[in-house]
Amino acid sequence: MSGLLTFERLKWASFTHSAVYTVLLVVWLVPGLAGLEAVFGMGHGVGWIAMSLACIVALRLRVIDLRLAVAVAVLGGIGPFIGSYEFVRQSRARRTGRSRGAPGFA
């Protein structure tokens, strides 16, 4: 299972979820797009549930740390950009070798 749940795959899934949420906000603001609002609203809801479950499993497998899991699973329902930001922040920290969190995180 840990081969499927990699940091990079979760990061791109988070970016995709943020894009769906962005479209949802746009169609919510534009009058007359109620049908699209329902579609992207469902996409956001299902995406958040899937991301939450994936991040909980990834946390248990030590693919991601607790801070990132909380950013996605807890805060992602109201703003998935927080999780995407945290993925970017941790990607940069990993590249420079300044990773924080539980031992074993590279």
Image (tube, rainbow, N blue to C red):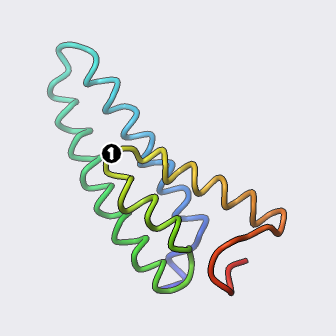
- Asked if 10 appears above or below 104 in the picture, the reply is above
Q: Which residue is drawn at 21% across and 38% down?
A: 39
- Asked if 75 appears above or below 25 in the picture, the reply is below
Quarter-wise, where is residue 36 in the image?
top left
Q: Which residue is drawn at 46% across and 48% down?
A: 16
Q: What residue type is labelled 1?
A: Ile
* Coordinates of residue 74 in the picture (x, y in percent): 35, 60
Q: Which residue is drawn at 36% across and 39% down?
A: 21
* Coordinates of residue 71 in the picture (x, y in percent): 46, 58
Q: In which quarter of the image is the C terminus?
A: bottom right
Sort mark 1 into few (<14), some (14-19) or many (20+) by Cα contacts within 10 Å. few
Left or right of residue 65, residue 27 in this image: left
Q: Residue at x 21, y 31 (%)?
A: 37
Badge 1 element: loop
- Asked if 62 appears above or below 36 in the picture, the reply is below
Looking at this rendering, what residue extends furthest in the right direction? Answer: 96
* Coordinates of residue 20 in the picture (x, y in percent): 38, 40
* Coordinates of residue 57 in the picture (x, y in percent): 41, 80
Which residue matches tag 1?
78
